Image (cartoon, grey):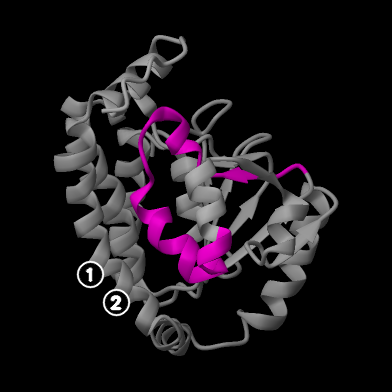
Amino acid sequence: MEKINFEFTHNDSVAKIVLNDGKGNVLDAVMMNDLHSVFADFKKNSNVKFITFEGEGKHFSFGASVPEHTKSEAGKMLESFHRLFYELIDLSIPAMAKISGQCLGGGMELALICNFLFADKTAKMGQPEIILGVFPPPASLLLPLKIGWARAEDLLITGKTITAEEAKSIGLINELFEDKSSMEAAFEEWLGKNILPKSASSLRYSVKAARIRFNRVIKKSLPKLEQMYLTGLMETGDANEGINAFCEKRSPVWKNM
């Protein structure tokens, strides 16, 4: 694995995945391929009861690679990125994101597909895609399902970033901790109480049952949003201008078309 650290813990029943790509833990093509490989292995492993995602260092993830959002690369990037969500749905292994620092864009979308979100007080969460002139397909579905339409639209349409306290107050995260070490200690206690005593196969059925509507919405609507992104949004001048401006480290010049 080039851009993730991976190990089994707790008698090989917990799969610990650490995003590890320098300061921002950017979800680029290489990291996504690493995740696909790990998920494929999980299909053949009936003993996995739980998956955790976290970021190496101070941040969870700055998000997907912006240069891979350019018109020529967007189709390939979205196909690989969205496949992560379909794979996690099909696995139905309960999962948790443990969030410190920035958790933005595609990084936040990876956290959102998890069943549980723990965070410490350094966490900053948001979907800033609109600032670049684009939109986040998975989050456009996941956020309303998890926190309701009004709160989801506030994040999706403004692109603002919120604090860990705000995320807790709107139900985006399950538990908030003072720092990373206290989050880890609480996680171990929570895991021992709520996951480890249970059957791996029964946990998967529990996830499938709890998410029957959730999964149906994602599988039916995410392909439609992917097409909207590629054949609608990326045909506009402003979407391309926003991505190019970010890559060129300048302010975008919108033409509103």
Instruction: Say if 56 sits above or below 250 in the image.
Output: below
User: In front here: 55 or 165?
Assistant: 165
The reply to whether the magenta stretch includes residue 253 is no
Query: Which residue does the image show at 57% across and 67% down from the upper left?
Result: 147
Q: Amino acid type of disc 2?
A: Arg
Q: Quick one: label 2, few (<14), some, or many (20+) residues within 10 Å?
A: few
Residue 7 image point, x, y percent: 51, 53
Q: Quadrant of residue 78?
A: top left
User: In front here: 38 or 182?
Assistant: 182
Residue occupied by mark 1: 220
Residue occupied by mark 2: 216
**Do callouts 2 and 1 mark residues in contact (Cβ within 8 Å)?**
yes
Is any atom of residue 45 visible in this view?
no
Instruction: Say if 35 sits above or below 174 in the image.
Output: above
Instruction: Say if 160 sits above or below 95 in the image.
Output: above
Secondary-structure class at tag 1: helix
Secondary-structure class at tag 2: helix
Is any atom of residue 187 visible in this view?
yes
Query: Which residue does the image show at 41% across and 37% down from the upper left?
Result: 27
Q: Amino acid type of disc 1?
A: Lys
* Total marks in image: 2
Q: What stretch is highlighted in magenta?
A: 122-151
